[in-house]
Image (cartoon, rainbow, N blue to C red):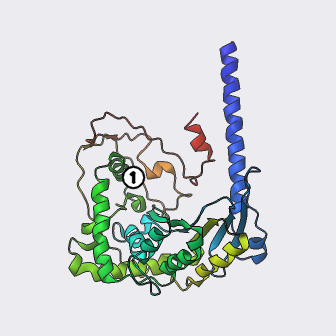
Amino acid sequence: MRSCLLFMLFCLTIARRLTLFERHHTRLHRHLKPSLDSAQSASTMSILIPKSDTRLYKYLTLKNGIRTVLVSDSRSEKSACALGVKVGAAKDTLPGLAHMTEHAVFLGSQKYPQENAYKDFLNKNGGGSNGGTGMEQTVYKFYVNSNAFSQTLDIFAQFFVHPLFLESSIAREVHAVDAEDNKNRMLDFRRQLQLIKHLMRPHITEYKKFSTGNIITLTGNDTNKNARRLADEIRRFHRTYYRPADMALSMVGPQSLEELEKMCEIFAEISVSASGEDDGLVDIPTHQTKLSHIQELHTPSPYSPPPSYTPLSVRIEDIFRVGKEKVVVMHTLTQSVRELNIYIPLPYSYSSPHTPSLTQTHT
């Protein structure tokens, strides 16, 4: 009887924690959600922060629509910046096009045409940079000594104001993407990820894509012949999706909020003239790769594809083969280990450390 009561008390405690997490997540989302059509709401936007946080924050929207968060941290020895774009591999027309665009952005601008100007300046000023392409977002970021922050911001912003996308530079950078793919093929978790993508239902084409890309998917293994075609695809992709309204900017450093606000104005030069349409992009068939070591044991069931995929409208059972269908996947690992992975499909939720689903998996 006592053990039963203890178990009930434990369940009530977990339920209470999940409720608090959900409430906190809702409040956080409400506080951070921007209102682009109201200057007053942008200027009075409040950011929910812990009482122990001594840093100063300010939210604002640039004149071209870029949502911006500024953080003044007097104890910081470095300054940093991150720019996120709401587009990723789900919009690829060539396997790896979004990832290739991420690489190509860093290959010079009209104001700073030298390919290595950005990295060289960071190296000389105690900085570093990186970028990442997901299925629905691409993020560019850097850090640098604070006394070089303003100059670095100017170099960085020009990648999005007037990028060059030269054919010669792109032809060389394809080999860097290909090398990244070769490295990933030796990582078991990347191999497993591609298998999980393969198990998605056929109509979920956005998430079945091979997102890294390589020299075959991007140029047909003939860089000299197809570099111009790839450069055109990158320009169209950039013109269509790299819109200020779909960008978010964050800057942090020991500078005052007033100084940071003046610095971020350089990003207001990013043009709002992007088409925002998919019509100009050519849908190029992806390369099909035959997968080995796969054994699928399932019973087909009637299915009618839903409308165009959106994460919040498609049922999870329509994305993965779940329910009555069972799938067993066996593949050879690169390392000498035995491993069992059980995947439990959950409804789509914004990736946040405060979501109840994440809490549940750790209780």
Q: How crowded is mark 1: few (under 14 residues within 10 Å), some or many (20 or more)?
A: some
Which secondary structure, mark 1? loop
| Residue displayed at 30% across by 71% down | 174
On the rendered structure, is 42 left or right of 77?
right
Q: In this view, does 121 lie above or below 193?
A: below
On the rendered structure, is 135 left or right of 95?
right
On the rendered structure, is 269 left or right of 41?
left
Q: In this view, does 123 lie above or below 168?
A: above
Q: Is residue 357 visible?
A: yes
- In the image, 239 versus 280, the foreground residue is 239
Quadrant location of the N terminus in the rendered image? top right
Quadrant location of the C terminus in the rendered image? top right
> In the picture, residue 73 is in which quadrant?
bottom right
**Image position, residue 240 (x, y; %):** 47, 79
Q: Is residue 139 visible?
A: no
- In the image, 190 versus 295, the foreground residue is 190
In the picture of the structure, the residue carrying the numbered disc 1 is 200
- In the image, 312 versus 136, the foreground residue is 136
On the rendered structure, is 350 left or right of 318?
right
